[in-house]
Image (cartoon, rainbow, N blue to C red):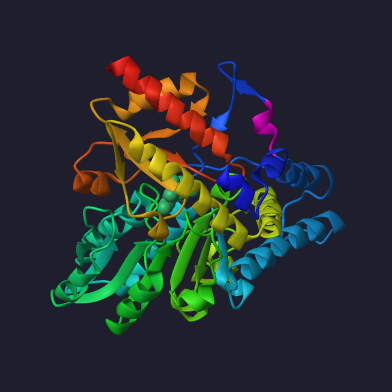
């Protein structure tokens, strides 16, 4: 099969690292095609967290005893791994958050409340996940700024020709864009959008939740101002995400959450803030989760982000024509060359939840719903889609089983 013959990444071998694939679902091997929602975890990540809890666990940044120092080193070591992974200039620019949603809320609140007002425009794409849509819509409303969207065309790509018209309608202060669409796999031209945002005097906020786990991302080369991603989509645990931001912007921002650790000095009269990145990390940190994320970064780095991106493309080239051949199946999204390993489709006359249910009986896990993209669904004229998404452990047989399952769906509802 072309996919495996050409692969520089051995998905079959990697798959053995993931204990979850040792089980059967409804008596069939698990075909997990929902990695855009969350990825599975290799044993190495699970072991790193267990070992940390068993040997080095204590609260961090406070204890002067050995265990506390070791735990602090593990946590700060994970921050350095993140820094190197996205090529940030300094660990001061790397803030640990609960997930990417928390990272984007941090920027919307802490930057937005102090920097937006009447006459300003907040611009996000029509394909944003609600995480980079709703916070901006809300903060725009709170500050009197206008909230607008960069429209999407029928293929699910940004209509960049609309940018100048939008710019003429007010002072654009923020541009928010997802690097890769979680519903359609569309890869957005972030460098072009960033250059345009900066010409307007706006900041560029990138939701890289579907990019950082799947392709090399270099924040310095990208040139944006803020970028967030989430650990659980890249072989890491839940409960940890990252906000990268330019040091001068983070430094000038008010804190978002207040309490322990984020302070320098507290008196009855006033409180001053800790240095970056601690100013934005109130309360006990997700310590073991950071260790897990560090192990996940080691894992995907060893696989190689370029190999991973290339492999997912091969899977896409394998899946798209087969899906397109199926009678009654309508595919959404751009051509393979401008998309990542995500395919959304509808099966004519069958609700996506029914599609997903029948596929589940075949052991095939896909997602059905609006994928936290309600404005995009409305633009596409559907309430929901069925979505299959790939990762480094996806094998072509899983795509074959998806296709077989969809044939059963057609027969069931014929
Ligand atoms: C593009 C995008 N942004 C944001 C999110 C939200 O991620 P989390 O729930 O980890 O904050 C997701 C995940 O569903 C996503 O795909």
Q: Residue at x 58, y 28 (%)?
A: 30
Q: Is residue 36 left or right of residue 20?
A: left
Q: Is residue 171 left or right of residue 33?
A: left
Of residues 396 and 85, the one drawn nearer to the viewer in this rendering: 396
58 over 80 or under it: above or below: above
Q: Residue at x 65, y 41 (%)?
A: 41
Residue 13, how many percent across, how many down? 72, 42
Q: Which residues are magenta?
A: 18-22
**Residue 241 in sight here:** no
Residue 364, how many percent across, how many down? 50, 28
171 over 373 or under it: above or below: below
Question: Is 20 included in the stretch rendered in magenta?
Answer: yes
Q: Residue at x 22, y 38 (%)?
A: 382
104 over 200 or under it: above or below: above
- The quarter of the displayed image where residue 204 is located: bottom left
Question: Is 380 included in the stretch rendered in magenta?
Answer: no
Q: Residue at x 22, y 61 (%)?
A: 149
Of residues 44 and 63, the one drawn nearer to the viewer in this rendering: 44
Residue 60, how many percent across, how many down? 72, 57
Quarter the N terminus occupies: top right
Of residues 180 and 390, the one drawn nearer to the viewer in this rendering: 390
């Amino acid at each position: 099969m072309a996919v495996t013959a050409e692969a520089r990444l051995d998905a079959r071998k990697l798959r053995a690292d993931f204990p979850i694939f040792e089980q059967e679902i409804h008596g069939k091997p698990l075909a997990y095609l929902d990695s855009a929602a969350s990825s599975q975890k290799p044993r190495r990540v699970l072991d790193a967290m267990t070992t940390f809890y068993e040997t080095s666990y204590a609260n961090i940044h406070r204890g002067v005893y050995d265990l506390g120092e070791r735990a602090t080193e593990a946590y700060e070591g994970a921050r350095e791994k993140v820094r190197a992974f996205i090529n940030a200039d300094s660990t001061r620019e790397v803030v640990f958050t609960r997930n990417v949603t928390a990272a984007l809320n941090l920027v919307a609140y802490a930057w937005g409340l102090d920097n937006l007002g009447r006459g300003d425009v907040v611009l996000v794409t029509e394909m944003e996940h609600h995480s980079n849509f709703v916070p901006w819509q809300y903060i725009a409303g709170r500050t009197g700024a206008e909230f607008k969207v960069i429209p999407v065309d029928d293929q699910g790509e940004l209509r960049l020709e609309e940018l100048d018209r939008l710019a003429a309608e007010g002072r654009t202060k923020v541009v928010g864009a997802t690097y890769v669409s979680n519903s359609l796999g569309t890869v957005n031209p972030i460098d072009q959008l960033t250059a345009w945002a900066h010409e307007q005097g706006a900041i560029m906020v990138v939701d890289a939740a579907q990019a950082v786990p799947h392709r090399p991302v270099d924040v310095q080369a990208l040139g944006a101002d803020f970028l967030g991603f989430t650990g659980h989509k890249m072989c890491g645990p839940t409960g940890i995400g990252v906000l990268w931001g330019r040091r001068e912007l983070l430094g000038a921002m008010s804190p978002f959450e207040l309490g322990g650790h984020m302070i320098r000095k507290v008196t009855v009269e006033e409180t001053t803030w800790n240095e970056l990145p601690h100013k934005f990390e109130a309360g006990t940190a997700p310590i073991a989760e950071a260790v897990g994320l560090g192990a996940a970064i080691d894992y995907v780095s060893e696989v190689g982000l370029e190999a991973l991106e290339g492999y997912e493309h091969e899977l896409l080239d394998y899946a798209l024509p087969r899906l397109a051949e199926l009678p009654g199946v309508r595919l959404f999204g751009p051509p393979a060359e401008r998309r990542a390993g995500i395919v959304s489709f509808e099966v004519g006359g069958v609700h996506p939840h029914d599609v997903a249910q029948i596929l589940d009986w075949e052991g095939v896990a896909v997602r059905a719903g609006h994928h936290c993209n309600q404005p995009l669904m409305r633009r596409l004229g559907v309430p929901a889609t069925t979505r299959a998404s790939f990762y480094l452990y996806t094998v072509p047989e899983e795509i074959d089983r998806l296709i077989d399952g969809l044939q059963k769906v057609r027969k069931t509802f014929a």
